[in-house]
Amino acid sequence: MTVELPKGRAPSIRDVARLSGVSHQTVSRVLNNHPSIKASTKARVLQVMEELQYRPNRAARALSRGRSRTIGILSASSDQYGPASSIAAIQNAAREAGYYVNTANLASGDRASIEEALNHLMLQAVEGIVVIAPQVRVFDVLAQLSIDVPYVTLQSTGRLDDHALSVDQIAGARLATRHLIDLGHRNIYHLAGPQDWIEAEARMRGFLDEMGARDVPTTAPILGDWTADFGYHAGRELLRVRDFTAIFSSNDQMALGLIHAAREAGLDVPGDLSVVGFDDIPEAAHFWPPLTTVRQDFPELGRRCIALLLRSLGGEAEGYPGTIVPELIVRASTAPPSF
Amino acid sequence: MTVELPKGRAPSIRDVARLSGVSHQTVSRVLNNHPSIKASTKARVLQVMEELQYRPNRAARALSRGRSRTIGILSASSDQYGPASSIAAIQNAAREAGYYVNTANLASGDRASIEEALNHLMLQAVEGIVVIAPQVRVFDVLAQLSIDVPYVTLQSTGRLDDHALSVDQIAGARLATRHLIDLGHRNIYHLAGPQDWIEAEARMRGFLDEMGARDVPTTAPILGDWTADFGYHAGRELLRVRDFTAIFSSNDQMALGLIHAAREAGLDVPGDLSVVGFDDIPEAAHFWPPLTTVRQDFPELGRRCIALLLRSLGGEAEGYPGTIVPELIVRASTAPPSF
DNA sequence: CTCACAGTTGTGACCGTGCACATGCGAGCA
DNA sequence: TGCTCGCATGTGCACGGTCACAACTGTGAG
C-alpha cells in the first residue's frame, strides 16, 4: 500500500496529480479553493497531499503569479520596546493576512545604510514597505531610487493621507501634557525624540498644541535619541538651571534616564519634579517611582498598519475605523508642583 | 539614445541580454561572477543592467536553484530586549552573508501555536531555523512534524553539539553568583527563567554549579517568566520570609520587579538586599539603584549564530573560534550583606 | 599541420505553479 | 432533436532564472 514517492526532491503539484489521478491544474485549483471542484475530487487530492506531506513551493508560486506576498519592514532601533513591539505586531497581523514579512535593520542613519537596506528589501520583491525609522531621510532615498512600492508609516502627523496610519500620537501627547497642566504645572519641558522620526514630531506637536491651547508659555523642546542614556545626560544638563517643575518625555526610556539624573541631583520625583513618559513599556510600572505614561495599543497598531498597506496593494478595503486614541496611565511619577 | 524598455513588467535577464547583444546565459554568468567572462563583456552587461535598473528576480532564482537563501527565526517574547537584540543581530549577520530572514512570532507557548509558526516558516522554504523560544517544546514539534531543516539555538548548555551556539551562559551565571559569594553572601536565591528556555536552564545550572563549587548551600530556584511583573510578585512573596540577603535574577526585567517589591517592603537595595541581573539592557544603568548585571555581546552572538547555521547548510566553515564569555558589570545594586 | 585544451559564449531544457483557453458532459429549453 | 449554458476538468505555455551541454576561438605542443 505504499505510494510511489519522488526520490530526491520534494513532491510537486504534479506528483499529487499523478497519484490522485487528476491533472496538475485540478490540484492547483484545490490549493486555491476554486469554487467548481467536485467535493469528492477535492477530498481525494487533499488526502494525497497529506500522505505526501506536500507543501506548495512559494518561489514557484511567486514566480508564476508575479507577486511575492511579502512585505518589508524597514526598522531602526529594533531592540527598543516601541519599535520591537510594532514589528512583532506587524508580523503577526501580516501572517494572519497570509503575507510574509522581511525585516531590514538600519545599521546607521546615514544615506548609504538606508539605501542598502532598501535594496535588500527590493531584492526580495516586497510588495509594500512599513517604515519604523527616521522617516524623512528614508522617504528621500525612496524617492531618489525611484522605487514605487506602496509604503506605510506607523504614525500619523494628524492629517490622514494614504501613507500614514491613524494612530493619534498627537492626542496621546496632549493627554500627557494636559495631565501636567491640570496638576498645576506651568513650567514644563518636553524631551522629544529625533526630529526626523514622525512619531517624535507628532508627540512634539501634541505637546505644543496643548500648551498653546491652555496658554501656558513654552520653551523649545530638547531633541533626544530615544535612549535612557540621553535622558540621563539631558537631565543633568537641565537640572543645573532648574527652571521647570515637570517634564514630558517622548518615550519611557528617556524618562527613566531623566529620573536617574534627578535623583542624583538630590531631587524627589514627583515631589520636586513630575515626569511623564510615552509607550508604557512593561517595565514602566516597576520604575521608581512607577511611571505615569501614555499607553499605545501595539497589536491594534500592527493590525491597522497591515490593513492600510493591503488596501494600498489593492486588496480588500476591510473595515477601517477611526483613530486609535492612546490612553494615559497615571502612576506615581507625577504630582502637583511643590512651590 | 533611449533604450527599448519592456513595457509592463520588470526587466528580465533576457531584456538585458538583448540590449547588450549577448545571450541570457552570459548575463546570468555576469550576475554570478563566473570566472571566464571577458572584462569588456562584463562591463557592457553591467552597464545595461544599470540603465534598465535591472534587479534579479529572487523567486525565479530560488525556483531554479532549489534554494531559497532564507533562514527562519522562531521567536517568542520578541518585544523584550534580549530576544529583540538577538533577532536584530541575526538579521544583520544574515544579510551580510547574503541570506534573507523571516521571523515567526509565537502567539503563545502551546503546541498549536508552535506548529502554526513552524508551518509558516516551512512554507517559506527556509533553509535553516534559529530558535529563540521555549526550545524544548519547539524541538518536540520539529521532530513530530518530521521537519528536517538544520536548526540552531542561541544558547549553549555547555557541551558543544551541532545545534547549540557556544555562548557560555553558564560562565556568565557563575560570574554573577561568584560576585555575590565573594561579597560575603551565603543565602542567595535564584530567580530563573521559564524552564524550557535553554538559556534559562543554562543560567540556572551556572548558578547551581558555582554555589556547589563554593560549598554554599542552596535552595531551589524560582521559575519565572522573564517579566518585571513576575519579578515584582515573586519578590513580594519571597520578602514575607526574608531568609536571604541576595538574589541572582535570570534577566534584568525580573530584577527590576524584584527591586520594586523590595523598596515597597521598606528594604534598601543594596543595603538590605543585593540584586544581580542578566543581559545588561540599556536601561539597567539607569535603574535605581543602577543594576549590577551580566553583559552579553549580542551582535557577536548573531554573527556566530549565522556562522554556525551556514556551516550546517554546508557552506564555508569559516573561522569559528571558542566561546563568547559574558562580562560582569558591577554597578550599585550589590554590596556586602549587612548583618 | 593537427590535435588537445582552456577560455568564452550560446542553445535548449527545466524548476513548480498559475493562467488562458479548450474540452467533455449533463441539464434545460424551444 | 438540436442548441445553449454552466460545471468540472484537462492541455500547454509563461514566469525568470540556472544548469548541462555544445560550439567556437585561439594557442601551444607534438
Image (cartoon, coloured by chain):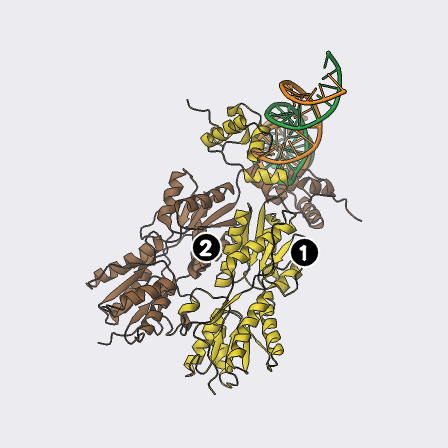
Chain colours: A yellow, B brown, C orange, D green
Residue depicted at 52% across the width and 26% down the height: A40
Residue depicted at 50% across the width and 85% down the height: A242
Give percent across and percent down for residue A106: 55, 60
Q: Quadrant of residue B34?
A: top right
Q: Quadrant of the N terminus of chain A?
A: top left
In front: A305, or A113?
A305
Give percent across and percent down for residue C26: 62, 19
Q: Chain of mark 2?
A: B
Q: Chain of mark 1?
A: A
Q: Answer whether residue B278 is visible to the viewer in this image.
A: no
Question: Amino acid type of disc 2?
Answer: Arg
Asked if the residues shown at circle 1 and circle 2 are in contact, with their CB atoms under 8 angstroms apart, the answer is no
Total numbered circles = 2
Q: Residue furthest right?
A: B1
SS state under label 2: helix
Residue depicted at 63% across the width and 39% down the height: A65
Question: Mark 1 sits on what residue?
Answer: A145
Sort mark 1 into few (<14), some (14-19) or many (20+) by Cα contacts within 10 Å.
Answer: few
Which numbered marker is on residue A313?
A: none
Q: Answer whether residue B56 is visible to the viewer in this image.
A: yes
Question: Amino acid type of disc 1?
Answer: Leu
The answer to whether B276 is drawn above or below residue A215 in the figure is above
What is the distance, in whole Å, between disc 1 and disc 2 at their CAs? Answer: 30 Å
Give percent across and percent down for residue B144: 38, 39
User: With A193 as the anchor, is B219 left or right in this view?
Assistant: left
The answer to whether B100 is drawn above or below residue D29 in the figure is below
Which one is closest to the eye, mark 1 or mark 2? 1
Question: Mark 2 sits on what residue?
Answer: B303
In front: C10, or B138?
B138
User: With A203 as the anchor, is A264 left or right in this view?
Assistant: left
Sort mark 2 into few (<14), some (14-19) or many (20+) by Cα contacts within 10 Å.
Answer: many
